[in-house]
């Protein structure tokens, strides 16, 4: 019997390379036009308030490519430690850093170098000493055990073939009583097994 949430036959390395290519394009050419919404128009669709967006660099906003708004699931309090899983160009990480204030800490994690380069450059534009970006996988988060008060993620878990491992990593890095606030894609009808192995269907 197959383990629930694990796709066994997909070529994980090819999948990651395909995802990296797609989101490198979003980082480098945000106005290109994609099969999904991006940037400031998407931020508005997802309910980001103008006041929030004023607090973060435009370069982080323009490459947003999420599916929802993790901040609608609960407030981020001043002083909290937050991990943004699959942070991309960092829009949600910057928002989290705005909410935590300088007494908090935020770590954005992503596997796509182009997105991380853009996020780090944006962080250099302002006073974001309590925000850092790390390269890593959702299945192997570069964060210590029990460090986070909150794990946020936006449209990333659906791209991971081993979802139980991803959620296991979230639980590992959360302190006791910590919380998970994710926005992602859900399906009402099971995806056929043969379709799960088609990498083109994962990325669009």
Image (cartoon, rainbow, N blue to C red):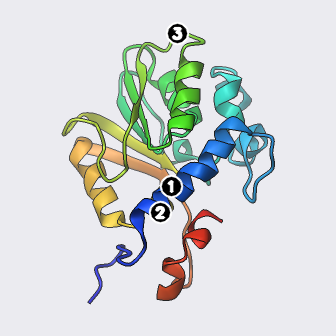
- The label on residue 140 is none
Q: Is residue 2 visible?
A: yes
Q: Callout 3: 10 Å neighbours few (<14), some, many (20+)?
A: few
Q: Mark 3 points at which residue?
A: 127
Residue at x 60%, y 63% (from the top left corner): 203
Residue 34 vertical placement versus 130 (above, below): below
Residue at x 59%, y 28% (from the top left corner): 118
Residue 90 locus on image (x, y percent): 55, 33
Specify the quadrant that holds the C terminus.
bottom right
Numbered disc 1: secondary structure: helix
Q: Is residue 66 visible?
A: no
Numbered disc 2: secondary structure: helix
CA gap, disc 2 and disc 1: 5 Å
Q: Do the residues labelled 2 and 1 touch (CB within 8 Å)?
A: yes
Residue 193 locus on image (x, y percent): 47, 86
Residue 146 locus on image (x, y percent): 20, 38
């Amino acid at each position: 019997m197959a383990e629930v949430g694990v796709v066994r036959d997909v070529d994980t390395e090819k999948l990651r390379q395909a995802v990296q290519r797609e989101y490198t394009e979003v980082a480098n050419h945000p106005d290109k036009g994609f099969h999904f919404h991006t940037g400031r128009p998407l931020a508005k669709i997802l309910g980001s308030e103008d006041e929030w967006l004023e607090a973060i660099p435009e370069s982080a906003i323009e490459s947003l490519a999420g599916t929802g708004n993790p901040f609608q699931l609960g407030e981020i309090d001043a002083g909290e430690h937050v991990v943004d899983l699959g942070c991309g160009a960092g829009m949600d990480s910057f928002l989290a850093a705005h909410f935590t204030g300088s007494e908090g800490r935020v770590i954005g994690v992503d596997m796509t170098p182009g997105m991380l380069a853009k996020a780090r450059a944006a962080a250099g534009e302002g006073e974001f000493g309590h925000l850092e970006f790390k390269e890593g996988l959702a299945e192997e988060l570069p964060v210590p055990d029990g460090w986070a008060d909150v794990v946020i993620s936006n449209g990333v878990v659906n791209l991971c073939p081993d979802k139980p491992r991803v959620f296991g990593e979230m639980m590992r890095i959360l302190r006791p009583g910590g919380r998970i606030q994710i926005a992602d894609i859900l399906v009402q009808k099971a995806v056929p097994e043969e379709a799960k192995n088609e990498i083109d269907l994962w990325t669009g």
